[in-house]
Amino acid sequence: MVQLIDKDINTIEVKEWSGLHLLHFIGSSCSQKVRIMLNLTGVKWHSHPVNLIKQEHLSEWYLGINPRGLVPCLIHNGDVHIESNDILIYIDKNFNKNKLIPHNKLEYISKELKFEDDLHLDLRTLTFRFTVPTFLGKKDSKLLELLAKDRTIRGQIDNHKKNQLAFWKSYEEQGINDEQARISISKFKEAFKRLEQNLKKNDYLLGKDITVLDIAWFIYVNRLGVAGYPFQKEHPNLYLWFRKLFLIKEFAKETIVPFPVNLIGSLFRATQIIKGNTIKKIGSF
Ligand SMILES: N[C@@H](CCC(=O)N[C@@H](CS)C(=O)NCC(=O)O)C(=O)O
């Protein structure tokens, strides 16, 4: 669980916030994941949008709450929780009557969520290669310097952001090249083959009931579907599972993209198809 300790938090006003607060961005996959969880529990929460396009997550104010400069972040009665998967477990433990983590499965689920989180940079790689125009994706160098400053998580200098900084530096210099995209696609192909196997015999990833694993992977499949990953052809059970979850309003609601973003995305993807820059082509599907 990544719950910050007192001295990690530099934006001290949040320590006074009572109730449940989520700092999040509409189009962020990790935020969508947590919002689906909150929708399913029905718990009341306060919304604090953090606009990633305006790079508000790299402001001194936000870095004083989440030193990693990432959304989402959950604040419960002044306690600050980061890392979306840890937040899912926290919500399930503290607010959820209809448990989405069966009591004897916490260890297994935690391992699987770690596996999913380890693919997050690959998700970002494919998102930024296939769904976001480079001019929109680039970060302000001054803000990256702010992010690079040493800050602590649970009292220790946090090295977690080194990978992120390396990602943004490389993105600034050369965008996402074919080789980077291929590596990320092949990791997902392997991960999805395993999920496909589970779904041959089960309705959901862990059996007959929805668990947090379904929430976590739903979001990845949604994002990669937008990026053009051919789920229906490659992983038909996963495709049907996604469609089934999409019929549940608590899930569907979080995948809606605001009109201007959707329009820019659609135009970008259309030009990429014309140029032959598609996930199908790069991934040799
Ligand atoms: N492991 C983190 C990853 C969070 C993450 O990467 N969030 C993305 C949005 S989905 C973000 O804040 N990106 C902003 C950026 O990298 O500048 C979690 O699960 O919370």
Image: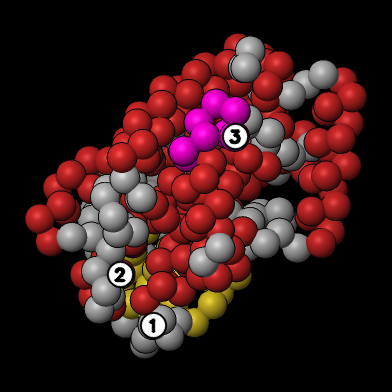
Q: Nearer the viewer, residue 223 or 46?
A: 223
Mark linked to residue 13: none
Q: Separation of disc 3 and disc 2 at Cα?
A: 32 Å
Instruction: State the predominant SS element of the stretch in magenta.
Output: helix
Q: Is residue 202 left or right of residue 66?
A: left
Query: For residue 3, which quarter of the picture?
Result: bottom left
Mark linked to residue 91: 2
Q: Nearer the viewer, mark 3 or mark 2?
A: 3
Secondary element type, mark 1: loop
Q: Is residue 53 left or right of residue 59?
A: right
- Give the labeled residue for mark 1: 43
Magenta span includes 232: yes
- Give the labeled residue for mark 3: 232
Q: Residue at x 26, y 50 (%)?
A: 207
Q: Are marks 1 and 2 in contact (CB under 8 Å)?
A: yes
Q: Earlier in the sequence, mark 3 or mark 2?
A: 2
